[in-house]
């Protein structure tokens, strides 16, 4: 019986690896190049954005506090998102992407009935909303040059996978981040290099999180530039060339 179960699990893993995720219909595109391009985005916490040479820069003036910048769109349970980033302060910083973010009863995260969030991490990991998040750049002052990106499932701050290094702590290069969500399958690439690859079984850490919002979080020391944020529907085929 154990042998049969082992073979079944191995086949399931091979089937998951065999899936090829490709871009379908374009759902959202934003150059992030001007103040007008983010006029409908929502900042929580002490973040400020500026615009120069086709990039959006985000930081906390005087390192006053952490912050999250939310895209105004709701995205489905299957999507592929891409954006470009560049670190403008290699001395310290931490970047996170929140996704599939909704209220615990299915509300929009900006619903008036939900508690106000201030950029404090516990508002997003142990508060009134559910989400997944990945720390794809990690060089916090209290944990410098951390090795590996972390994927967590919230509410609860459950670390479900420790992956490879995302955007290196000391890199000043332009990097492309690609996030794939296909139901419970979550993959993150940095410059086509796979950093995270995890399948939510919908049991161990609760139900699979489906649709919701995407937001960019920075700790207060961080100064990053962003551009060319795009989201497509995620389509699958039987072939895998990733």
Image: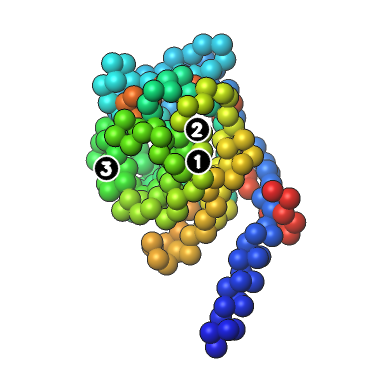
In front: 10, or 78? 10
The residue drawn where x is 42% and y is 62% is 207
Check contact, mark 2 vs mark 3: CB within 8 A.
Answer: no
Disc 1 element: loop
Which residue sits at x=46%, y=43%? 148
Q: Nearer the viewer, residue 160 or 213?
A: 160
Residue 44 seen from this side: no
Quarter location, residue 203: bottom left
Q: In this rendering, would 6 be left or right of 104?
A: right
Total count of labels: 3
Q: Position of residue 126 (x, y in %)?
A: 27, 48
Q: Relative to 15, does residue 195 appear above or below in the rendering?
A: above
Q: Can you name the residue that lies furthest to the top here?
A: 52
Q: Say the numbered circle drawn on residue 168.
A: 2
Q: Assess whether mark 1 and mark 2 are in contact (beta carbons under 8 angstroms).
A: yes
> Which residue occupies 66% across, 50% down?
21
Circle 3 packing at 10 Å, graded few (<14), some (14-19), many (20+), is: some
Q: Secondary structure at mark 2?
A: loop
Q: Is residue 101 left or right of residue 194?
A: left
| Mark closer to the chain start, 2 or 3 | 3
Give the CA separation, mark 2 to mark 1.
6 Å
| Residue at 60% across, 77% down | 8
Label 3 sits on a secondary structure element that is helix
Query: CA separation, marks 3 and 1?
Result: 24 Å
Residue that badge 3 annotates:
122
């Amino acid at each position: 019986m154990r042998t049969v179960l082992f073979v079944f699990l191995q086949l399931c893993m091979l089937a998951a690896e065999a899936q090829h995720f490709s871009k379908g219909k374009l759902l959202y595109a934003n150059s992030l190049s001007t103040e007008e391009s983010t006029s409908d985005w929502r900042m929580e916490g002490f973040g400020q954005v500026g615009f120069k040479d086709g990039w959006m820069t985000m930081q906390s003036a005087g390192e006053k506090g952490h912050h999250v910048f939310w895209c105004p769109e709701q995205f489905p349970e299957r999507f592929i998102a891409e954006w470009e980033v560049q670190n403008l302060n290699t001395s310290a910083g931490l970047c996170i992407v929140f996704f599939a973010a909704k209220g615990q009863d299915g509300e929009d995260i900006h619903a008036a009935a939900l508690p106000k969030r201030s950029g404090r991490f516990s508002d997003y990991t142990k508060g009134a909303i559910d989400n997944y998040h990945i720390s794809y750049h990690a060089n916090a002052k209290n944990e410098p040059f951390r090795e590996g990106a972390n994927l967590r499932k919230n509410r609860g701050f459950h670390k479900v996978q420790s992956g490879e290094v995302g955007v290196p702590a000391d890199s000043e290069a332009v990097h492309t981040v690609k996030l794939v969500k296909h139901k419970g399958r979550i993959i993150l690439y940095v410059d086509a290099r796979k950093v995270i690859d995890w399948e939510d079984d919908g049991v161990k850490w609760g139900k699979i999180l489906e649709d919701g919002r995407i937001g960019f979080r920075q700790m207060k020391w961080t100064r990053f530039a962003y551009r060319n944020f795009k989201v497509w529907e995620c389509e699958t085929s039987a072939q895998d060339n990733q």
